[in-house]
Image (cartoon, grey):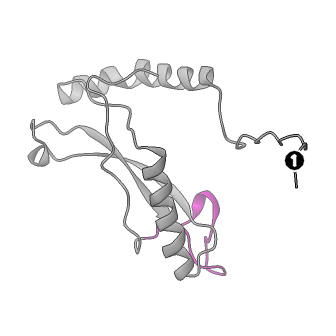
Amino acid sequence: MGKGLPKRKKKRPEKCITPEEAKELQHVWCCTRTPEIDKCIGFEDTREFHWSVEELQKYLKYVKKKSRKQGIDNPGIRIYFGAYPESKCKNKKGYSTVFLSPTGAPAGEMGKGGDGAPNNYDIEPYNHGNSGNPPIIY
């Protein structure tokens, strides 16, 4: 069954960008923000973060499961910039980080979805990725 049928090409997600667009975004970031940030904090800060696909899938599955139990059918993820307190860093530098924050509200509540969905403080945010030192250029 199904033998001989042509394989359907997987459609890329709508919000994908090209590698060229990604390079431009990083270039503009590095030219317009990196010098001031590094000057202000006194060292070259990280500006890229890494998690494996497996790690992210595991977290997203966790968010979906916990959200469903709360009556949230289509949760979102908001990504925040953060910085570690110097006192919690081995090298006493407060490097930048990002963390993923689940969003969403049960159907029928104000601001239930989309970009304006509220943070869901009942589900733990996600952090502790790896980053390049020095930062890895895209």
Judged by its main secondary structure, the magenta piece is: loop
Which residue appears at 80% of the width and 39% of the height? 9
Where are the magenta residues, as a range?
A: 104-120
Q: Image quadrant of residue 30? A: top left
Kind of residue indicated by mark 1 = Lys
x, y (%) of residue 41? 20, 30
- Write down the residue under mark 1: 3
Which residue appears at 52% of the width and 73% of the height? 65
**Residue 37 placement, left or right of 19:** left
Does residue 3 lie above or below 101 as drawn?
above
Q: How many marks?
A: 1
Which residue appears at 66% of the width and 37% of the height? 16
Disc 1 secondary structure class: loop
x, y (%) of residue 78? 49, 55
**Residue 85 placement, left or right of 46:** left
**Is residue 107 inside the magenta stretch?**
yes
User: Which residue is nearer to you in this view: 45 or 134?
Assistant: 134
Locate the N terminus and report the quarter of the image it occupies: bottom right
Does residue 22 lie above or below 75 as drawn?
above
Q: Residue furthest right?
A: 5
